[in-house]
Amino acid sequence: MDLGIVNIATTSTGYQAGGRALNRYRKRQLALRAKLQKKRTKSAKRRLKERSRREQRHVKNTNHIISKTATSRAAASSSRIRFRAASDRSLAGCRRSGVNSCSGSSRVQAQRMRACRLWWW
């Protein structure tokens, strides 16, 4: 299973979970956040917090549905699932210099890469 941005998940059996709907949702939320931030009122800040939580819940639910679908299809065909992130090349420098020397998000990505290289039965 490849994890990416355009296609959130792609399996070797042909299942592709596209990220188009999620990207459209995020774009719409971005426009709504911009409109609220422009007002700079107390209630606008409160609504921004609500919107942030709602967007997080939506993304979390979408990812849950995708992973559940992929695992149920793998179980039905009695095959194993191996996760592989699509951004292997972006972490090449971190692997050469060691994970601890990477700064910021690269370190987090490297840790996720190591965690994703597991076999799930």
Image (cartoon, helix red, strand yellow):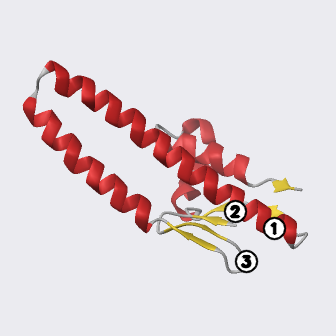
- Please name which of the two marks, 1 or 2, marks the residue nearer to the observer: 2
Report the residue that reaches farthest toward the bottom: 14
| Residue 39, image x, y percentages | 8, 31
Q: Which mark is residue 94?
A: none
In screen coordinates, is 72 left or right of 91? right
- Please name which of the two marks, 3 or 2, marks the residue nearer to the observer: 2
The residue lying toward the viewer, choosing from 44 and 120, is 44
Q: CA gap, disc 1 to disc 2?
A: 9 Å
Mark 1: give few (<14), some (14-19) or many (20+) Cα within 10 Å: some
Q: Residue at x 36, y 56 (%)?
A: 25
The residue beneath circle 1 is 74
Q: Residue 12 carries which label?
A: 3
Q: Which residue is drawn at 62% across and 41% down?
A: 99
Q: CA gap, disc 1 to disc 3?
A: 10 Å
The residue beneath circle 2 is 69
Q: CA gap, disc 3 to disc 2?
A: 14 Å
In screen coordinates, is 74 left or right of 3? right
Circle 2 SS class: helix
Three-letter amino acid code at the position of disc 2: Thr
